[in-house]
Image (spheres, helix red, strand yellow):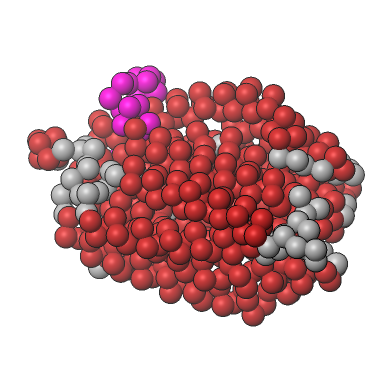
């Protein structure tokens, strides 16, 4: 049991086996996390109606934009922690983890205050229909006021990933997901709290998962210390976390901004298409999970091996891990296309919604495989300490390709039959941008500027082992 719930040393053994052992629990954990939003959508769609489903979905891009602080700190933490662990430097590891906890607390306060005030104005900027804007606003404000749980889970699970422990986060997510499902049903079907009920269920469940991650870290005192002196912000450690995490946070912000801009376009097609888009994005979330999981796994793998000074092993793992990502994603994508109508039927009984959603999923299918290449190779770059190149790839994919292309294609397809344009081109633009992202990722990985970006320099590594 100690080995199962302990950190994985990825500097030894067959690379693809180590990556798989580490990533599979993380993939299962990400599936559990995806259940948060999916269960919310199923409950509101079945118990309240299609308008409520559209309301919860329209709130998603706003949430994604305003939690970029958490994403940035989490990625920076995972990279720095994995490199210090690979280099076997206890003091640096202790200060890094302590600074992560303090930065998480500060970020939570900012989100609670700022995001709560901005919720309705942002929804108005997105042309959110009047029929659902009140539901959207209330849902968002509850999530933001309870954002500390989300923050601590995402960031502390990032620390656990950097330590090579993906199993603990899986267990905690399974626990909190079950709590979320039970509370969703209780708050909505019994207490009749509506959309607010699923928001309350989510923040309670996330708070529990965040607390469990913290308690797990407290017990890992054979590797590092969590003491008051480690919690005090220390310039060099805080800067490393922010410097490495900031580009990833920017990437997430750009992605969320592009989703907001496209959401505004989506909203122009009315509630029915908004609801169909929500269903597609929920299933899309599951299709993307192998990419995200293997990408995070390769970040930890690269970080530990860069910390250990083994560049050849990093590149060997990059090839094997990216191939595993592509194979896994392909299998899941084919399964979704085969059983897609059954999946869509979970959300709604409206046949038109199901048919529209399946059409959009067919368009997106090639993009999932392309995204596997993006996540695998950029995950290696991030783990090696180069978070700037993945940032520029994300910016180019989303802000310079997807958004302009979606508006251009919609404009070019306007006609007497389609006065607002052909709505499927919103998804075609996304697929094309993902394919271009894969091409860019291969090019920059082979170019190799990500090498030599380690946080832990060789002199420190050699003297403190």
Judged left or right of residue 83, residue 394 is right
Q: Is residue 288 above or below residue 186?
A: below
Q: Residue at x 48, y 48 (%)?
A: 400
Question: Which of the 4 quarters of the picture holds residue 236?
Answer: top left
Q: Residue at x 22, y 43 (%)?
A: 453
Q: Position of residue 402 (x, y in %)?
A: 54, 54
Q: Tell which of 265 and 342 is nearer to you.
A: 265
Region of the chain picked out in magenta, as a range: 220-242
Q: Is residue 193 visible?
A: yes
Locate the N terminus and report the quarter of the image it occupies: bottom left
Q: Residue at x 15, y 49 (%)?
A: 309
Q: Position of residue 32 (x, y in %)?
A: 59, 56
Q: Is residue 108 above or below residue 384?
A: above
Judged left or right of residue 406, residue 341 is right
Q: Is residue 370 above or below residue 260?
A: below
Q: In the displayed orientation, state which residue is furthest to the front.
A: 416
Locate the C terminus and report the quarter of the image it occupies: top left
Q: Residue at x 75, y 49 (%)?
A: 267
Question: Which of the 4 quarters of the picture holds residue 23?
Answer: bottom left
């Amino acid at each position: 049991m100690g080995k199962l719930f302990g950190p994985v040393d990825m500097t030894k053994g067959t690379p693809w086996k180590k990556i798989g052992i580490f990533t599979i629990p993380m993939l299962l954990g990400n599936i559990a996390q995806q259940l948060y939003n999916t269960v919310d959508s199923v409950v509101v769609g079945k118990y309240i109606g299609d308008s409520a489903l559209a309301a919860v979905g329209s709130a998603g891009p706003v949430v994604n934009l305003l939690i970029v602080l958490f994403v940035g700190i989490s990625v920076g933490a995972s990279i720095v922690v994995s490199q210090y662990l690979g280099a076997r430097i206890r003091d640096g590891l202790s200060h890094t983890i302590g600074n992560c906890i303090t930065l998480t607390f500060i970020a939570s306060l900012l989100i609670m205050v700022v995001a709560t005030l901005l919720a309705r104005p942002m929804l108005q900027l997105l042309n959110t229909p009047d029929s659902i804007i009140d539901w959207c606003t209330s849902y968002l404000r509850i999530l933001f006021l309870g954002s500390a749980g989300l923050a601590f889970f995402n960031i502390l699970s990032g620390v656990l990933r950097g330590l090579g422990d993906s199993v603990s986060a899986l267990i905690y997510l399974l626990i909190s997901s079950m709590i979320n499902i039970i509370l969703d049903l209780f708050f909505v079907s019994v207490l009749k709290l509506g959309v607010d009920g699923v928001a309350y269920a989510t923040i309670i469940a996330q708070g529990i998962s965040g607390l469990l991650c913290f308690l797990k870290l407290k017990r890992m005192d054979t590797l590092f210390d969590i003491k008051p002196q480690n919690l005090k912000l220390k310039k060099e450690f805080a800067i490393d976390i922010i410097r490495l995490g900031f580009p990833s946070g920017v990437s997430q912000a750009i992605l969320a901004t592009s989703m907001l801009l496209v959401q505004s376009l989506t909203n122009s097609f009315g509630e029915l298409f908004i609801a169909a888009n929500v269903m597609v994005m929920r299933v899309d979330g599951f299709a993307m999970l192998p990419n995200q999981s293997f990408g995070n796994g390769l970040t930890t793998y690269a970080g530990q091996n860069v910390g250990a000074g083994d560049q050849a092993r990093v590149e060997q793992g990059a090839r094997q891990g990216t191939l595993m990502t592509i194979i896994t994603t392909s299998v899941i994508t084919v399964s979704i296309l085969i059983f897609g109508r059954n999946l869509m039927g979970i959300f709604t009984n409206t046949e038109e919604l199901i048919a529209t959603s399946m059409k959009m999923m067919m368009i997106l299918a090639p993009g999932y495989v392309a995204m596997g290449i993006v996540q695998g190779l950029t995950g290696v770059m991030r783990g090696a300490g180069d978070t700037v190149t993945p940032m520029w790839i994300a910016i180019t994919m989303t802000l310079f390709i997807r958004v302009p292309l979606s508006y251009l294609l919609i404009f070019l397809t306007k006609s007497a039959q389609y006065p607002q344009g052909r709505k499927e081109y919103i998804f075609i633009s996304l697929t094309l941008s993902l394919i271009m992202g894969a091409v860019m990722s291969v090019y920059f990985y082979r170019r190799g500027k990500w090498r030599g970006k380690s946080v832990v320099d060789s002199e420190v590594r050699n003297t403190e082992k």
